[in-house]
Amino acid sequence: MKKILICMGSSCFARENRENLRVIEEFLKSHGISDSVHIEGSLCMGQCHQGPNITINGNEYHEVNSEELSGILRKELIEI
Ligand code: FES
């Protein structure tokens, strides 16, 4: 099962992961893959200075903004 780990620590959450979580949920729903991707919130990953941080299928992404997130999700979840 594919897995998304999104940092919900206060720094990442305040920066953009609140919006990023919404983008992820929308993306999964619109592609009909909500059941095959597990989303998990994490506590602070200890890399706040590089945040917002999201790990998808073991690949770490830093300074993720909501505009580029769809492209990352497409690459990680669709084009495999
Ligand atoms: S809050 Fe996300 S790495 Fe610290």
Image (cartoon, rainbow, N blue to C red):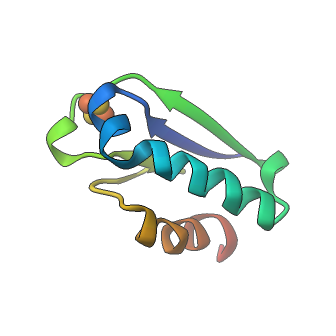
Q: Residue at x 49, y 52 (%)?
A: 20
Q: Quarter of the image holding residue 24?
A: bottom right
Q: In the image, what residue occupies the spot 59% across and 50% down? A: 22
Percent from the top left, x then y, of residue 28?
73, 57
Q: Looking at the image, is 44 positioned above or below residue 74?
A: above
In which quadrant of this rendering is ligand 1 seen?
top left
Q: Quadrant of residue 51?
A: top left
The answer to whether residue 75 is above or below residue 53 is below
Coordinates of residue 7 in the picture (x, y in percent): 41, 35
Q: Residue at x 14, y 42 (%)?
A: 49
What residue do we see at 37% from left, 48% from top? 16
Residue 71 point in image, percent of width and height: 51, 75
On the question of residue 11 being in view, the answer is yes
In the rendered view of the protein, which quadrant contains the C terminus?
Answer: bottom right
* Quadrant location, the N terminus: top right
List x then y, in percent, for residue 29.
79, 57
Looking at the picture, tell me which residue is in the foreground, 7 or 37.
Answer: 7
